[in-house]
Image: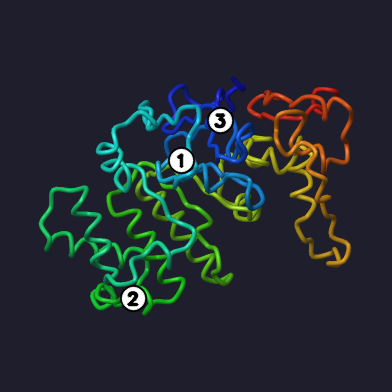
Amino acid sequence: MTPHASTSIPARPLLDIKDLSVHYPGTADRPFKAVDSLSFSIGTGETVALVGESGCGKSTTALAIMRLLRKPAAISGGEILFDGQDLLTLPEGEMQLLRGGAVSMIFQEPMTSLNPVLKIGFQIAEGILRHKTISKTAATQEAVRLLTQVGIPLANDRYHAYPHQLSGGMKQRVMIAMALACRPMLLIADEPTTALDVTIQAEILELIDRLKSELEMSLLLITHNLGIVAERADRTVVMYGGRAVESARTDRLLEAPLHPYTRGLLASLPQNSTPRSLLPTMSAGGGESVSGELGCLFSARCPYRESDCIAASPEFVEAEPGHYVACWRTKRQ
C-alpha cells in the first residue's frame, strides 16, 4: 500500500480516497490501469485540485467517486470514504440517494449531460423531487430560484427553455444549478469551463467560488489549467499515467515543485516575456514504462532519468511536511 497523501489533513476528512485503482481489460495478462493506487483526501470546506494532461485519469477518478463508470471500466481496488462511509460497498439504492444529494458533479460537457428533449427547469426540479420530500409546485419554485442564483436572467421564462435554446455558458450555469439543487457537501467540478470563452470562464469560476462559500461545500476541481489552480485550490494533486506523482499545498507546489513532470508543466506555461517559439516542451517519450509494472511511469520523458528510474517504480513519500512526491531523484538528493 502506498503512503497516504492526506496524513497531514484532519483525522477524518470529508472525502478520503485510499489506493483507488480502476482497470480496463486490455490484454489477457496485462489490464490497462486508468487509475493506479491513487490516494488523496479533501477536508470540509477545502478545495483540492486534480491536475494533469488529458488521459491521466482525472475524469475516471471523478466517475469512480460517483460510481458512474461505464463498462468495461471496473474498480479493482481501494476505498472511497465519504464522511467515513465507503462508497464502494454502499448498496446501489443508497448510492442513488447520495449521488446528486450529498455529492454532486458538474460534468465536462453540458450539452451531453442535459436531456435535449426536456425543459431545463423540469430537469432541475426532477432532481429536487428525487432527493427531497417536497411538492411539485415547491420544486418548481426552487428550480426558478436556483436559475436566478446561478445568474440566468428571466429565470421564470428560461425554466421552460430547452438546452438547444441556450448558449454554452448558460448550459453550464444550468448544470451548476442542477449540481447545487440539494446543497451538496461535496461538489466535483470536471473541467467546468471547457469550450467556454475567457470571459465566460471567469464568470463560471467566480460563480462556483461564491456558491461554495455560501453553501460551505468542499470542492474537487479537475482541470489542466494551472492558472485556475493557483487562484482557487488549497491543495493540488498532480497525476501522471493514472498515479499521483506529487501532492502539496498549492502555493508550495507552485513555488517549489519536486517532480520533473510538475516542473515541466509549470515551465510550459507561457510568459509575457517569452516568445512562443521558445516555450519549453516535454519529450513525448518512448513509452518504456507505460505499463507501470517496472520503473517510473515518467522515466521515458524525464531529463533526469537514471538506471534506478527504469528498474523500479518510486514510492509516493513525504519529502517534506505535507509535500508528497513519487520520484527517485528526490530520494537521491
- Label 2 Cα crowd, 10 Å radius (few <14 / some 14-19 / many 20+): few
Residue at the disc numbered 1: 64
Measure the C-alpha gap from mark 1 to mark 3: 13 Å
Secondary structure beneath label 3: strand
Q: Is residue 78 above or below residue 152?
A: above
Q: Is residue 36 above or below residue 279?
A: above
Q: Is residue 52 above or below residue 141?
A: above
Residue 164, percent from left and from top = 38, 77
Query: Which amino acid does the dot numbered 1 rest on?
Result: Ala
Q: Earlier in the sequence, mark 1 or mark 3?
A: 3
Residue 208 is drawn in which quadrant? bottom left
Measure the C-alpha gap from mark 2 to mark 1: 35 Å
- Residue 39 marker: 3
Query: Which amino acid does the dot numbered 3 rest on?
Result: Ser
- Label 3 Cα crowd, 10 Å radius (few <14 / some 14-19 / many 20+): many
Secondary structure beneath label 2: loop
Instruction: Judge depth for marks 1 and 3 and give the one in front.
Output: 1
- Location of the N terminus (image quadrant): top right
Foreground of the two, 221 or 300: 300
